[in-house]
Image (cartoon, rainbow, N blue to C red):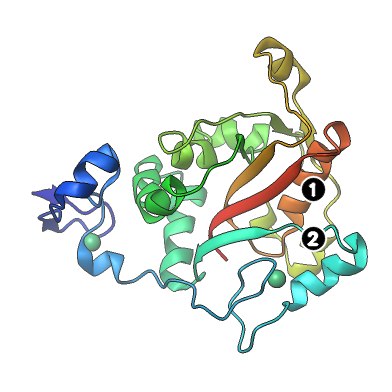
Amino acid sequence: MRECLLCGQLFLPELNLAELFVFKGKRKENLCPHCWAKFEKLSAIRCMVCSKNLSEAGICQDCKIWQKQYDQQLLHHHSLYRYNQEFHDLMVQYKRYGDYMLYGVLRELCSKQLMKIDYDFYIPIPSSPEHLKKRGFDTITAIYQELVPLTPLLKKLSGSSAQGEKNKAERLNTPQMFYVDTTYRNQHHIEIHKNNKILLLDDIYTTGRTLYHARDSLLLENPNVTIESFSICR
Ligand SMILES: [Zn+2]
Ligand SMILES: [Zn+2]
């Protein structure tokens, strides 16, 4: 029996022999079936650029804003779940109250999907130095570190407040806050080549401001690479 990380109920993880070998420690063992059902998968009709659910196929309003700024250079974004009340509550508990163990829930929600994709570099969106100090862990690294090999090449400037505390207009006007950590890059001999594919990893895509800034800072030094992004919800 396992104890569900969200509701505390004991449950029997489903035993699927094929998955047991392929996913090793990544099968469904942190969330009971009842809690799993609270998370709503994105439906098939979605924005062709950023995965947002739409009533008819096309491009969403957020991406139209980015189109004005970036023209054809839109960021192709992959996502899995709708940002519903359950997701909101989970993220408040994880990020605002720093409940570290909930990384196991978030990891479980996206592990199967991440096993299926292949990029040359997986770069996590970093926390600000202030948040890192306050929580004692990096929220994005904690979710993804057991799923894919991470290259923590980006750093966030201190003094940059969290996107979650802003309204939409403020989010869109947030100045660039990321930079490439050249010390890390040199120490670890990270070489990004022309045709490499990079996946940026975040938890939530709200306006896209954070991920576009992260991409911009990487493109400054690596103008010819392909950069896409992933978040658990949209
Ligand atoms: Zn549960
Ligand atoms: Zn979109």
Q: Which mark is residue 213?
A: 1
Q: Which mark is residue 8?
A: none
Other-residue count near label 2 (Cα within 10 Å), few / some / many at <14 / 14–19 / ≥20: some
Q: Between marks 2 and 1, how big is the CA–CA gap?
A: 12 Å
Residue 152 sits in quarter: top right
The reply, left or right, for residue 136 in relation to residue 223 is left
- Identified by mark 1, the residue type is His
Other-residue count near label 1 (Cα within 10 Å), few / some / many at <14 / 14–19 / ≥20: some
Please state the quadrant of the image where ligand 2 appears: bottom right
Q: Which residue is at 53% across, 35% downward?
A: 138
**Could you say where residue 227 lies in the image, as x and y percent from the top left?**
72, 46
- Identified by mark 2, the residue type is Leu
Q: Which residue corresponds to mark 2?
A: 74
Q: Is residue 133 visible?
A: yes
User: Between disc 2 and disc 1, whose residue precedes?
Assistant: 2
**Could you say where residue 226 lies in the image, as x and y percent from the top left?**
74, 45
